[in-house]
Amino acid sequence: MTAQTDTTGPVTTVYKVSGMSCGHCEGAVSGEISEISGVSSVTAVASTGEVTVVSATPLDDEAVRAAVDEAGYELAGKA
C-alpha cells in the first residue's frame, strides 16, 4: 500500500501584514498579491492584519514579500 501524495487543489495561506489600517490598504495589498502567478483569491483584513491567499500551488514567500513591499506594507510572516 502506498501513501497518496497528490497535492492537486487550491492551497490557502494566511499571512500577517503590518501597516494596514483601512479599506484602501486592503485593496493595495490584495491588488499586488493577486498579480502573483497562480493566485486565485486574496482577502485582506486591515483590522486583523491578516491576508488570506488562495493559490494553485504554494507561493514563494519572497514573491509575496515583494508584492506586499510594492504595496507599501511589511510582510510580518505567516499567521
Image (cartoon, grey):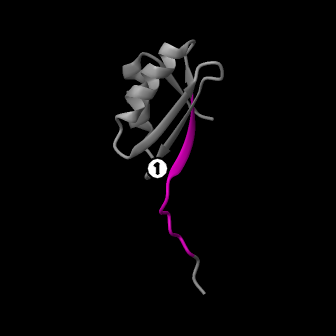
Q: The C terminus is located in which quarter?
A: top right
- Residue ranking furthest to the right: 48
Question: Does the magenta run of residues contain 73?
Answer: no
Residue 47 placed where, x, y %? 65, 18
Q: Residue at x 38, y 27 (%)?
A: 32
Secondary element at tag 1: loop
Question: Does the magenta run of residues contain 10?
Answer: yes
Question: Which quadrant of the figure has residue 16?
Answer: top right
Residue 19 in view here: no
Stretch of the chain drawn in magenta: 4-16
On screen, 74 above or below 77? above
Q: Residue at x 42, y 15 (%)?
A: 72
On screen, 32 above or below 8? above
Residue 23 placed where, x, y %? 53, 16
Badge 1 crowding class, 10 Å Cα cut-off, few under 14, some 14 to 19, many 20 or more, is: some
Q: Residue at x 47, y 18 (%)?
A: 73
Report the front residue among 29 and 67: 29
- Image position of 15 (left or right of 72): right
- Residue ranking furthest to the bottom: 1
Question: Which quadrant of the figure has residue 39?
Answer: top left
- Image position of 39 (left or right of 3): left
Q: Residue at x 36, y 21 (%)?
A: 70
Residue type of the residue flagged with mark 1 = Pro
Instruction: Say which residue label 1 marks.
Output: 58
Residue 75 placed where, x, y %? 51, 26
Report the front residue among 55 and 16: 55
